[in-house]
Amino acid sequence: MLGKKEVDAIKRRRFHRECFIGSAKAFLHGGRLRAQCHAMPDPAGLANLCVLCGFPLKRPFVEASQSTRAKRWASVLGAPDAARMLSAMDDTTTSVLSISGVTKRYDLRRVLRGVELELGAGEILLLLGANGAGKTTLISIISGRVRASEGEVSVLGTRAKPGSPSGASIGIVGHSPMLHPGLSVRDNLEWFAAALGIGEGKARVRDLLERFGAKGLSERDTGRLSRGEGQRVALVRAMLADPPLLLLDEPFTGLDEAGRLSLLAELGALREAGKAILLTTHETDLGASIATRVALLSKGKIESIETSEQARASGGVIERYRASLAPKQTHSEAKQDTST
């Protein structure tokens, strides 16, 4: 017969176990890692919590071998979620982009307010936000074109120097293709390859033009390219140094349906190749169809981050974002509606 202390201990253990499993599930489905009595900032913290919650382990999951961790997570969460948790834990060592406490002020106006963001290899993060929310400013800070007032940006664990471009580690596709008019596509790309110090630059340009279906554009004057052609060449330019991180600022703007589908296919291939991609676009459905996660930037802060599935569901971040863009009724309009 168990005494009261033993019974209470078992109840506490079960309660902590439920908190632990609930937190693991929340993490796997895009939520923050939080339990009722523990706050855990990362998967490693969550893994270590299992020891505190009474699991009969000799050491934390993160210190065990891959096969041992797989068996332990499977016993707790089930095989599918266990695989996702292991992948998430491994992603903590392959973080491509880390943004910590980034703030940007212009005189007394704060455009960004302590932005926190992580982006891993093989991820596409769709960054939503109304005009003026700070999306382009954030991308400019990540790329080194604009200096942050506070905070840090790291790419592959190396802190980016404020105000200094990171050409070899970051590729940028913006509103314009950033090409020199009057020169051919090939001359433009070879010039950029030389500026980046890429060995065998001509061969690299030739290979990328063929890879992205732009070989036929190589002798064209860049000033005579269509919007879709220009974006395709811009993507080649961004990929010259084979950077681990791509920043895409409104890449779908001005593209026709064929151009959009082509760009989506190219982004999907880059994601499969392990590139980390930060994407901003007002074409919300297009962006969400290729993204792995969706974040909402509002009033200079990341308001929420969800998986693509969560974001597209009813009540998800996309629905909330669209609702925030809807014109607000004035008091007189609301009064008139109720009176009719």
Image: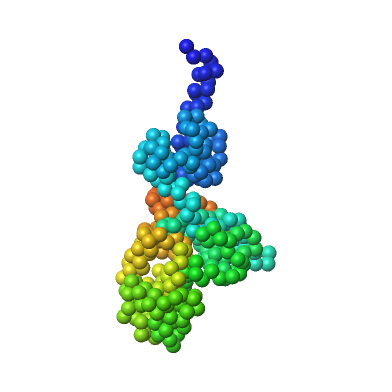
The answer to whether residue 42 is above or below residue 230 is above
Horizontal and vertical percent for residue 268? 36, 62
Horizontal and vertical percent for residue 18? 46, 32
> Can residue 298 be seen here?
no
Q: Image point 45% across, 85% down: which residue?
A: 181
Q: Is residue 296 left or right of residue 265?
A: right
Residue 202 is drawn in which quadrant?
bottom left
Horizontal and vertical percent for residue 288? 40, 58
Residue 65 is drawn in which quadrant?
top left
In the image, 8 versus 296, the foreground residue is 8
In the image, 132 versus 12, the foreground residue is 12
Q: Image point 49% across, 58% down: which residue?
A: 96
The answer to whether residue 252 is above or below residue 48 is below
Q: Residue at the far top: name it.
A: 1
Q: Residue at the far bottom: name it.
A: 182
Q: Image point 49% across, 41% down: which residue?
A: 63
In the image, 34 versus 3, the foreground residue is 3
> Can residue 289 be seen here?
yes
Q: Image point 54% across, 45% down: which residue?
A: 41
Horizontal and vertical percent for residue 95? 49, 55
The answer to whether residue 84 is above or below residue 111 is above
Exactly how many numbered labels are in the figure? 0
Colour scheme shown: rainbow
